[in-house]
Image (spheres, rainbow, N blue to C red):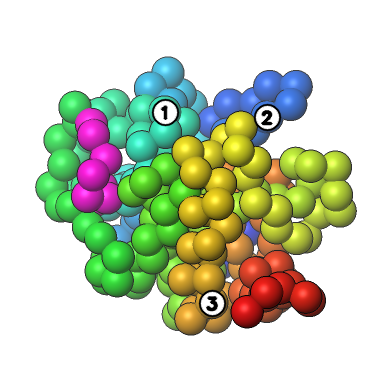
Amino acid sequence: MPTEIAPDVYDITVKTSPDARYRVYLFDGETPTLVDTGFEDTVDTLADALDDLGVVPERVLITHGDPDHIGGLAGVVERYSPETWVPEGVETDAAVDHRYGDGDSIGPFRAVHVPGHTPAHHALVDEGRGIAVLGDAVFGADTRGLPAGYFVLPTAFFSADVAAADEHLDRLLDYEFETGLVYHGSNVTEDASEKLATFVDFAGKPS
């Protein structure tokens, strides 16, 4: 079932396993927008959740090219024919209407290129709502056995270049948002940009 995180912003969990949870985010409003699409085999689960909400997506934004983020794109396009936005450099066989890059505005979102997890990885910030979809630039801290409500960096096991992932997080510090949405672990729903800044500019960090 969808979970409302903020007014008209929903976490749609499309798959769970004993040690993982996979999500799609829905921003309802004038142009209902999905951020990412889940796996190829979870499109029906996503569609059932959208039916429960009575929402037809008109736009899809992809953060990066991992299968749990872009795998369902072709199925979503076939079912709903939304306008699609995919980062430059992300390969897909699905129909793509627009390619985007760092600094581009897409509706209420500003794209922020945060490479490292993957080379073309982007976060999407809606400062008007005070929400950032951080993709896999960071995970919820509880994925590493720490208290929920904070961020951790995905390890090298999950990142193409963990040093680059760490280095480029500071690109998000130009934005203010109360809520930081992640795909693994718990979301940060209070003081998210401040907590991210503390994580990036930690005490004793070399200048």
Residue 101 visible at all: yes
The reply, left or right, for residue 44 in relation to residue 103 is right
Q: Residue furthest front?
A: 206
Task: Give me the residue at 46% from left, 71% from top.
Answer: 171
Q: Residues within 10 Å of mark 2 (few under 14, many from 20)?
A: few
Q: Position of residue 41 (x, y in %)?
A: 42, 18
Task: Give me the residue at 68% from left, 29% from top.
Answer: 20
- Identify the residue under disc 1: 67
The reply, left or right, for residue 74 in relation to residue 171 is left
Res. 20 mark: 2
| Residue contact between numbered discs 1 and 2, judged by CB atoms under 8 Å | no
Q: Position of residue 30 (x, y in %)?
A: 31, 66
Q: Quadrant of the C terminus?
A: bottom right
Question: Which numbered disc flags the more N-terminal residue, 1 or 3?
Answer: 1
Q: Residues within 10 Å of mark 3 (few under 14, many from 20)?
A: some
Question: Which numbered disc flags the more N-terminal residue, 1 or 2?
Answer: 2
Question: For the residues marked 1 and 3, what is the alpha-carbon distance in whole angstroms?
Answer: 28 Å
Mark 1 residue element: helix
Looking at the image, residue 37 lies above or below residue 39: below
Question: For the residues marked 1 and 2, what is the alpha-carbon distance in whole angstroms?
Answer: 14 Å
Residue 8 visible at all: no
Residues in magenta? Answer: 85-92
Q: Main secondary structure of the magenta part?
A: loop
Res. 159 mark: none
Mark 2 residue element: strand
- Identify the residue under disc 3: 173
